[in-house]
Image: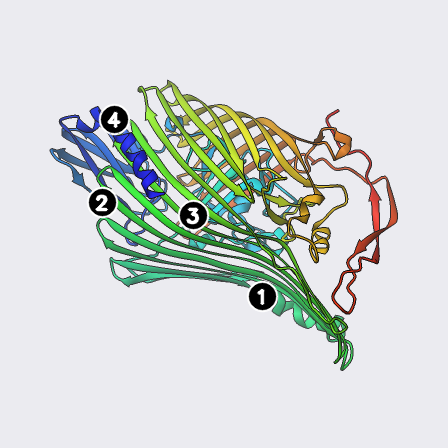
Amino acid sequence: MLKTTTKFLLVILFMFPMVLLAQNKFTVSGTIYEKGSDETLPGVVVVNLNDNSGTVSNPFGFYSITLPEGSVKLAYQFVGYATVVREIELKSNLIIDIRLENTALLQEVEISAEVQERISEETRMSTIDIPIDQIKNIPALLGEKDVLKVIQLMPGVQKGSEGQTGFYVRGGGPDQNLIMLDDATVYNANHLFGFFSIFNGDALKSVELTKGGFPARYGGRLSSVLEMRMKDGNKEKLHGEAGIGLLSSRITLEGPVKKGVSSFLVSGRRTYIDILAQPFIMAASDGAMAGYFFYDFNAKYNHVIDSLNRIYVSGYFGKDKFYFRDRRSDDQLSKGSFLWGNATATARWNHIHNEKVFSNTSLIFTNYDLSIKVREEIDQDDFYELRYRSGIQDYSVKYDLDIIPNPNHYIRTGAIAIYHLFRPSAVVVKGSDMNENISNEEKIPSLESAVYIEDDWGMTDRLKVNYGIRLSQYLAQKKTYLRPEPRIAARFMLAKDLSVKGSYAIMNQYVHLLSNTGANLPTDLWVPATERIGPQQSQQFALGLARDLPKHGLMVSLEGYYKTMDGVISYTEGASFLDVGAQNADDDPLKWQDNVTTGQGKSYGAEFLIQKKRGKWNGWIGYTLSWTKLQFDDLNFGKEFFARYDRRHDISVVGIYTLNERLTLSATWVYGTGQAITMPLATYIAERPYPSFDNTGTNSGNYFGYYSAQDYGERMHSG
């Protein structure tokens, strides 16, 4: 993999020989930190005030800008931090590390107005970054600050059921969102059956959502990339914060391991719903016990080896647990539990090769697991036990290389390989009358990999283009999928603060989520693309206008998009995860393919956003107009119908007013039209076969259960 990337680098160096050999030009590079904590700062704008050329610090705070020899005035600006201006006489390559001071209220001075973030000058479109301070100040359900609920307030993003954290981006399902925490994929981002997310805002440093115009470095999902990075930990002093809510308490602690060299961060949260509710449950149920709780734990270690090398180790561990226990007599006992949770671990090495080349190497582990356990004891010698499990594990290696030959080119290249282990469903059955336990724990392995290269190229003062290609490969059983994914985004300046933007991207997705609800429950099953059920693919076009109003600190954008989706999967009529589990008790782990159907979809619409990120008054207004339609040959008589999460109009208003350092007032207002729903026409009793095991452990298949079924007729469709 590294050899492949080295070849890319040689090609790139060959492409720009005149740039690299140009005389009388020197490079200023370094790392940008937060003053007082030495936390690296991504996305800091670095501008040469002589000619307004500039660059942006990468996700690890590294920046590089090549300028003509002579007197240079550089400005470093980041939302929520005081602007720093450095005047230097450039006669050789220089390394200048910068420390920006975090300030709650930035004074409006002329120099900050000149270099503040400008959405009109950015090449990328359909990208939203939200300052962490804004996330913490937005009103929250039951006092629980929630990143995903804030994301739902953005245009182009729609929520599922009211109060839940599931989100849908430009007509895509919840599985089409790539959610990453320190480069690690998070497969289930919900607590309390979707009402809270797993992300603790106290432990986060940055949040960025990309919903279109994807650069080539992103892949693996069709609709969006939500990239979150944890704080590195304060290298200068011990610092902590805590909070008590109606449902949970949280605490975060960070500080130096060796001052100025290494640091740690630990953050934890746990609910006490089970503790508070237990006395009432026992009183109401004559001694039966039941409860529910969840917890989150984040940890990170950051160590500076020298000026060119830095390592990070970070992880997240969280779990939800619902449990019950009912002893009806001395011998009779019923008990069970429903558990689901995530674990991630990331080890990263940052290396500065020279003043123009930066690399990041990551080793990543991800695990998501769902477990249902039920045990019935009639007496000491008579029992029945059922265990159901589902999950996915990822082992990944990732290498990224940033090359910045001059302010007109920012080149990124890299590669990633992911080894997936899927367990769509596994059933273990035990019983006192069985001579042999029934078990199916087989896992499905697959390998996903990709290489990419992209360039953010300032062709002229008015025209800037981000173009690139990603080549993804997926090995499923005996079949290999190899798919190119071209990407291009461009902006053209119509005036000083006004630009028109356009983008086109092809995305491929090699994992599916089997779901027959709109709630993104933990019973939704992750399954791989196979020889029979291929990957999903999307094409998205977007066109928009971006305007800056620097005197008022406002950014305004208007975008229209059209997206097609192929290879989308859905359960067949009446199927659910229970059917998958029942059949897999004695069948192969790919039996789930018999319960699904593939189809296609399309989504189109327009989005408007006006946003203010700084000052006493800040917040945003967002509006979305959209249509989302699906079509499956085996569903709805083959007719096109509106998706469950189709919503015509969505409006959100967020306002935050800072009275002083201790008091902040905030409010939100949302309005959304109804979603498509199909009402049942009739209800009846039906039979469903379940596996039945004799005393040798053989499935005789002669047990039938009865359930209430409904006839829905034709779904809502476009006609």
Q: Which residue is mark 2?
A: 97
Judging depth in this view, the residue of 646 and 394 nearest the camera is 394
Judging depth in this view, the residue of 509 and 203 nearest the camera is 509
Amino acid at circle 3: Asp
Which secondary structure, mark 2?
Answer: loop
Q: Quadrant of the N terminus?
A: top left
Tell me: 674 left or right of 346.
right
Mark whose residue sits in front, 4 or 1: 4
Tell me: 260 left or right of 316.
left
Which secondary structure, mark 1?
Answer: loop
Mark whose residue sits in front, 2 or 4: 4
Amino acid at circle 4: Phe
Q: Residues within 10 Å of mark 2 (few under 14, many from 20)?
A: some
Q: Give the number of the disc on residue 183.
A: 3
Amino acid at circle 2: Asp
Q: Give the number of the disc on residue 91.
A: none
Residue 100 can be seen, yes or no = no
* Alpha carbon separation for disc pair 2 and 4: 27 Å
Which secondary structure, mark 3?
Answer: loop
Which secondary structure, mark 4?
Answer: loop
Q: Which residue is mark 4?
A: 16
